[in-house]
Image: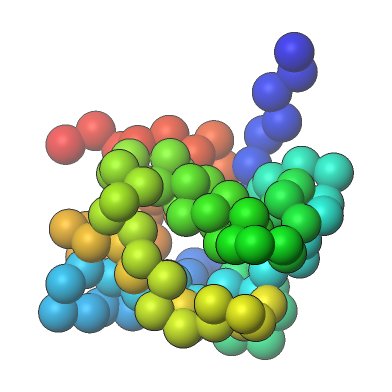
Amino acid sequence: MTRHRQPALDQVLLGLAVADHPDGATVTLRIVPRAPRTAFAGRYGDAIKLRVQAPPVEGAANDAVRDFLAARCGVRSSEVDLLRGHRSRDKVVLVRGLDAVHVRSILGRADGAQPRA
């Protein structure tokens, strides 16, 4: 199985799309469902474009977003909440327990690896 390398997201985009929240950090996303694979796809205005394999049916795409961000940020899926956009392509997602600086650092890495503490 070939592992696809995630593109690095530029720091300007991360500064616009990732913000501090009292419970963690929020990430503003534009979702493209039914993609060939789940991966970041660059910028959409002030949001990060995220392609997901799942269709936008019965919450499948929302679950895929939650699972992808949880895996990428190294947290449990239960620590990733959808704040806005349950039925929209434009979403704001909360990653609990991590501040915006940490989330920007993780998402800015091309390989998707966790930075060492």
Q: Where's residue 10, x and y in %?
A: 57, 64
Q: Position of residue 4 (x, y in %)?
A: 71, 31
Q: Which residue is pictured at 54% across the width and 77% down the height?
A: 86
Residue at 46% across, 83% down: 84
Q: Please report the residue visible at 65 percent of the width from the left and 62 percent of the height from the top.
A: 58
Decide: is 106 above or below 87.
Answer: above
Residue 18 seen in this snapshot: no
- In depth, the one of 43 and 37 nearer the eye is 37
The extreme top residue here reads 1
Q: Where, quadrant-wise, is the N terminus in this rendering?
A: top right
Count of numbered badges drawn on the protein: 0
Q: Nearer the viewer, residue 48 or 7?
A: 48
Q: Quadrant of residue 49?
A: bottom right
As drawn, is 58 to the left or to the right of 109? right
Q: Position of residue 81 (x, y in %)?
A: 36, 66
Q: Is residue 29 left or right of residue 104?
A: right
The residue lying at 30 percent from left, 43 percent from top is 76
* Residue 52 shows in the view: yes
Q: How is the image coloured?
A: rainbow
Is 54 displayed left or right of 6 in the figure? right
Q: Answer above or below: position of 56 versus 115.
A: below
Q: Quadrant of the C terminus?
A: top left
Q: Quadrant of residue 19?
A: bottom left
Q: Quadrant of residue 34?
A: bottom right
Question: Residue 93, how many percent across, how many down?
Answer: 42, 71
